Image (spheres, helix red, strand yellow):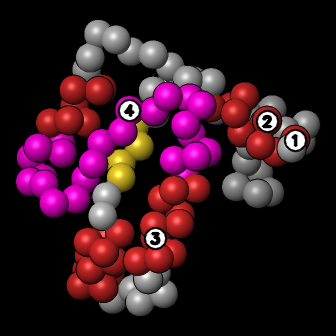
């Protein structure tokens, strides 16, 4: 992606506007899932929490739809995502502009 992807001034590719769904969760539960499912040990809860917060800060100005995805049944999470996708209040965000702003800071 760095060589051929979306790069302000260096590529003609753009990110198409769309609704942003931001899934959040308990860092300890995410860590536990990484350990049990992927045997991934390089992401301690503190690092997961920091990454999650940085991601929330990054997209906050675009008003993402936030869905808490831990300590819940999978069917409930899927239902919440479907509500966002199929709702009548579709409000696309200009993610391309946001990424360009970040790249030019």
Q: Is residue 21 left or right of residue 93?
A: left
The answer to whether 8 is drawn above or below residue 93 in the figure is below
Callout 4 secondary element: strand
Callout 1 secondary element: helix
Q: CA distance from mark 2 to mark 3?
A: 25 Å
The numbered mark, 2 or 3, whose residue comes first in the sequence reads 3
Residue hosting label 2: 101
Indicate the position of residue 82 as horizontal and vertical percent values: 22, 31
Residue hosting label 3: 48
Callout 3 secondary element: helix
Labelled pair 4, 2 in contact (Cβ < 8 Å): no
Residue drawn at point x = 45 percent, y = 33 percent: 64
Residue hosting label 1: 104
Quadrant of the image for the C terminus? top right
Indicate the position of residue 34 as horizontal and vertical percent values: 33, 78
Indicate the position of residue 9 as horizontal and vertical percent values: 91, 37
Specify the farthest residue to the top.
88
Residue 19 in which image quadrant: top left
The numbered mark, 3 or 4, whose residue comes first in the sequence reads 3
Quadrant of the image for the N terminus? bottom right
Labelled pair 1, 4 in contact (Cβ < 8 Å): no
Badge 2: few (under 14), some or many (20 or more) residues near its Cα, within 10 Å? few
Labelled pair 2, 1 in contact (Cβ < 8 Å): yes
The numbered mark, 3 or 1, whose residue comes first in the sequence reads 3
Callout 2 secondary element: helix
Indicate the position of residue 12 as horizontal and vertical percent values: 81, 32
Q: Read off the magenta span.
A: 55-78
Residue hosting label 4: 65
- Residue 17 appears in the figure: yes
Viewer-closest of 100 and 69? 69
């Amino acid at each position: 992606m760095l060589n051929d992807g979306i790069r302000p001034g260096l590529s003609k590719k753009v990110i198409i506007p769309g609704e942003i769904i931001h899934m959040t969760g308990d860092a300890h539960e995410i860590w536990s899932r990484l350990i049990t499912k992927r045997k991934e040990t390089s992401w301690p809860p503190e690092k997961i929490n920091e990454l999650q917060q940085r991601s929330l800060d990054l997209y906050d100005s675009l008003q993402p739809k936030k869905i808490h995805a831990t300590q819940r049944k999978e069917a409930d999470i899927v239902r919440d995502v479907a509500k966002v996708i199929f709702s009548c209040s579709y409000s696309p965000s200009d993610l391309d502009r946001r990424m360009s702003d970040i790249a030019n800071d």
